[in-house]
Image (spheres, rainbow, N blue to C red):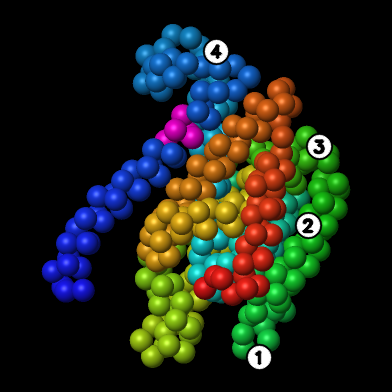
Amino acid sequence: MSLRALSLAARRSRPIRIGLWVGLGMLLTSSLALGVALGPVPIPLAEMGRILLGESRDPTMTAIIWEVRLPRVLLLALTGAALAGAGAAYQGLFRNPLADPYLIGVAAGANLGALIAVALNLSATVFGLLALPLAAFLGGLLTVGLVIRLARIGGMVPLTALLLAGVAVGAILNALSLGLLMLMVGRVAPHRAWIWMLGGYALGGWPALRGAFPYVAAGLGVLLLLGRPLDVLQFGEEQARQLGLPVERVKRLTIGAATLATAGAVAFTGIIGFVGLIAPHLARLIVGPRYPRVLPASILLGASLLAFSDLLSRILLPPQEIPLTILTAFLGGPFFLYLLNHARRGAFF
């Protein structure tokens, strides 16, 4: 194919790419709007618009939007974005289609770190609620280091060893978290403790959103800058070094940023599984395999997926709420088995 033909093909594909990004943005916008508008008390979109613009005179509807639904939907969308972005980064770093914060145990470590912070009442210190994600970050970082060390065989981190180590360490840490929660029932309401362990809106409100946002934004911001280095890593570490990539620095930055984003989310919503597994694979189907596109697409899809999941958790069995991990497991469990089958055949990476 001539250079001119390649140029023409690139120009023709540009509107398609723009349309894909517009579609992802519209999907996220609609998921947020529906999440705020629908619930036990449905609110018409027109009324919701007036409330957000400060033109409504209905104090009840205004309180429902501003004090209950809006911070909830934004926090869970932020959580979905964090888990999906971290999952895409872990998959690129380990060149492993099954890596995500839930399956490799990072979310469990971050959850235990946050619970220890609650047990020690660190939120009452000068750091306030920022102490919870900081403790979660340290817990997640120690966990991912332990999992990689346990899974490393001859300098490599094989798929099976990574999963086995992640599942084993995650199970131990979840048991420790459950035991710690049982000891803290007097400090954390049993209902909130139950939601936290199964994933959901446990420590909500605007303070939780303000506490999570700096960590998630910093982590995802660094990951977005690592898109091209992650692309180069797909050729293998030796080839990446020959191309001039500082491999060890990229690995440390990726692990640190992905764990930071995960910690910021898990500290306030508990463990929510499979979002970091599903969203990156859907992103690859939509925008292709290159990480400068996969990472932002995963973030948008993860936010949309968890916002829609939260909406379903509130409207399927009213007035009861279905824990988010149950809903995401119904989607992620079969998806994980499908990916595992294809990974065994060498169909990925």
- Residue highlighted by disc 4: 60
Dot 2 or dot 1: first in sequence order is: 1
The residue segment tinted magenta is: 29-33
Q: Quadrant of residue 259?
A: bottom right
Q: Tell me what residue is drawn at x 86 percent, y 48 percent.
A: 183
Q: Is residue 190 above or below residue 314?
A: below
Label 3 and label 1: CA atoms lie apart by 46 Å
- Residue highlighted by disc 3: 190
For the stretch drawn in magenta, the main secondary structure is helix
Crowding at dot 2, Cα within 10 Å, few <14 / some 14-19 / many 20+, comes out as many
Q: Is residue 154 above or below residue 116?
A: below
Dot 4 or dot 3: first in sequence order is: 4
Q: Secondary structure at mark 4?
A: helix
Q: Secondary structure at mark 3?
A: helix
Dot 3 or dot 1: first in sequence order is: 1
**Amino acid identity at mark 4:** Thr
| Nearer-the-camera pick, 8 or 185 | 8
